[in-house]
Image: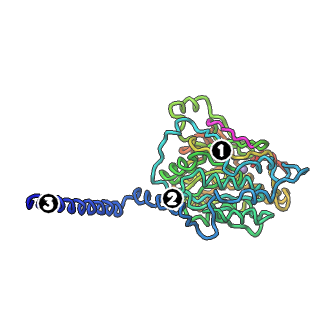
Amino acid sequence: MRRKSRVLLCFAVLWVLGIAYYFYSGTALSRKDEWGSSYSSSRGRSQHSDEKTHTIDALPPGKVRWQDFNQNLYVGATLVRPGQDPYARNKFNQVESDKLQMDRAVPDTRHDHCRSKQWRSDLPASSVVITFHNEARSALLRTVVSVLKKSPSHLVKEIILVDDYSDNPEDGALLGKIEKVRVLRNDRREGLMRSRVRGADAATAPVLTFLDSHCECNDHWLEPLLERVAEDKTRVVSPIIDVINMDNFQYVGASADLKGGFDWNLVFKWDYMTLEQRRARQGNPIAPIKTPMIAGGLFVMDKEYFERLGKYDMMMDVWGGENLEISFRVWQCDGSLEIIPCSRVGHVFRKQHPYTFPGGSGTVFARLNEPKRSAAVLSSILVQEKWHLHLCGCGSGPLNKVPDSVPVAVEGTPGNFRTDAVDFIIVPEGAAFPARPSNNWLFDARPA
Ligand SMILES: [Mn+2]
C-alpha cells in the first residue's frame, strides 16, 4: 500500500515537472520567436497582425474596407442619362464601364512561367499615385479597388489620388473613405506632371507607383515590379499594358513582344522586337525587357531616384511628352528602363483626349507643346553638361558636345549620346529639328 502510494507520488511529481517543463519550453520558444530580430520574421508577424486588425475592424475612423464601399451610390450619381452620348464625357463608353462590378474578374494574361515564380519576401512598400481630371467614377473606382485587391496588403502603403481640379470635387473626396486612400485636390488645373509631382512629394513609402485613372491591375502585378526596383534603385519599370477595350470594356492581353519607342515628332509608339530579339528571349520569355521608352502612364520607381532625376519638368502643362522626358532623364542618370512581362495592368486606350486644354490648344503650343519641350530639354541635356550635372548630380564624365540644332532621333544609329546603357538612339547630324506641329496633332497622335 505504501509502496503503491510512493509510486503514485512519483508519477504525480513527474507529471507536475512535465507540465512545468512543457510550459517553460513553450514560453521560451515563443520568447525566442518574439526576440527573433530577422527582418522577415518581424514582418511576418506584422502581416499577421494586419490581418487581425482587418477582421477586428480597426480601420481609422471614417474609413471602410473597399469591399464595404457603396459602389452603386457612388457610380449611380453620374450615370449616363437616356439619350445622352455614352462617349461624350470620357471618350470611352461610360455605359459599359458603369455596368461593371468594381472588382470584376479579369483574365490572368501572364505567361505560364510567371505563375510558379516566387518573389522576394523583403520587398519595399509603395505609394500608389493616381492623378485624374474628370475621370468616370466607375473607371477610377475600379483602378483603386484593383490596386487594393490585387496587391499584398503590406506592399501598398497608401493610394494617393490627386484630383486635378475635376468639375465635381466629390469624385475624389468620396473615395477618400476607402482604406489607405488619401485625396489631394488641386485648386486650379495643374496638368499631369505637376499633379504627379504633388502626389510624389506627399508619398511616404520608399517606392512610387504611378498609375493612370482608368486601369485594372492583374494578379501579382506589383511584386515583380517592386523586386526589380528593390534590387537596383535606378531601374524604372513598367508592366505589360493590357488593353481594356474602350467600347465594350473587354480585357484583352497585350503582346509581350513590344518595346517603347518614339518617332520623329517625339510621339511615343510601340515597336515590335526584331526577330533576333524575339529569338533571344525564347530561352527566358519572362526576363525583363530593356526599353528605350516607357509609355509613361504606368510605372514604378524609387522615390529618391525620382528626386535625384529632378522629378518632372514643372513647366510642362496638361499632358504629353512626360514619358519621353522621364526616359531621357533616366538614361542620363545611369538608370535603365524595363518592361516586366510578369506584371500586367489593363488600361483603357482611347483615340481622343477626353479633356480640354486650358486656354485652348493654341495657348499650349504658344508655350511649347510638351513633346517639343521635351525635345528642347533633351537638346539642352545633350548640349550642356552643366545641365546634366544640375539635373541629377550624378553626372560623371563630360557629354559629347553637339550643336544646338541637333534633332532628337531614334533607333539603330549609334551616335554621340551615351550608348553604353541602351542599345538604340540617336542623332543623325545635320537633320532638321523635328518640325511639324499642326495645331492639333497632339490631340490625335497619342491616345492618353
Ligand atoms: Mn491613360
Quadrant of the rendered structure where residue 195 is? bottom right
The residue indicated by pointer 2 is: 51
Residue that appears at 66% across and 35% down: 272
| Quadrant location of the N terminus in the rendered image | bottom left
Q: In this figure, what is the number of numbered marks?
A: 3
Question: Looking at the image, is mark 1 or mark 3 earlier in the sequence?
Answer: 3
Q: What is the magenta range?
A: 249-256
Q: Within the image, what quadrant is residue 339 found in? A: top right
User: What residue did someone put label 3 on?
Assistant: 10
Q: Residues within 10 Å of mark 2 (few under 14, many from 20)?
A: few
Q: Give coordinates of residue 168: x percent, y percent.
A: 79, 64
Q: Residue at x 53, y 39 (%)?
A: 114
- Residue located beneath label 1 in the image: 105
Q: Earlier in the sequence, mark 2 or mark 3?
A: 3
Q: Residues within 10 Å of mark 3 (few under 14, many from 20)?
A: few
- Whether 439 is drawn above or below 1: the answer is above
Q: Amino acid at mark 3?
A: Cys
What crowding class fits label 1: few (fewer than 14 Cα within 10 Å), some (14-19), or many (20 or more)?
Answer: few
Q: Nearer the viewer, residue 280 or 382?
A: 280
**Separation of marks 1 and 3 at Cα, in angstroms:** 65 Å
Q: Residue 444: give its label.
A: none
Nearer the observer, 100 or 296: 100
When the figure is inspected, residue 183 is found, relative to residue 237, above or below; the finding is below
Way the structure is coloured? rainbow
Amino acid type of the residue tagged 2 in the rendering:
Glu
Check if residue 3 falls in the magenta segment: no
Predominant SS along the magenta part: loop
Q: Position of residue 334 (x, y in %)?
A: 53, 52
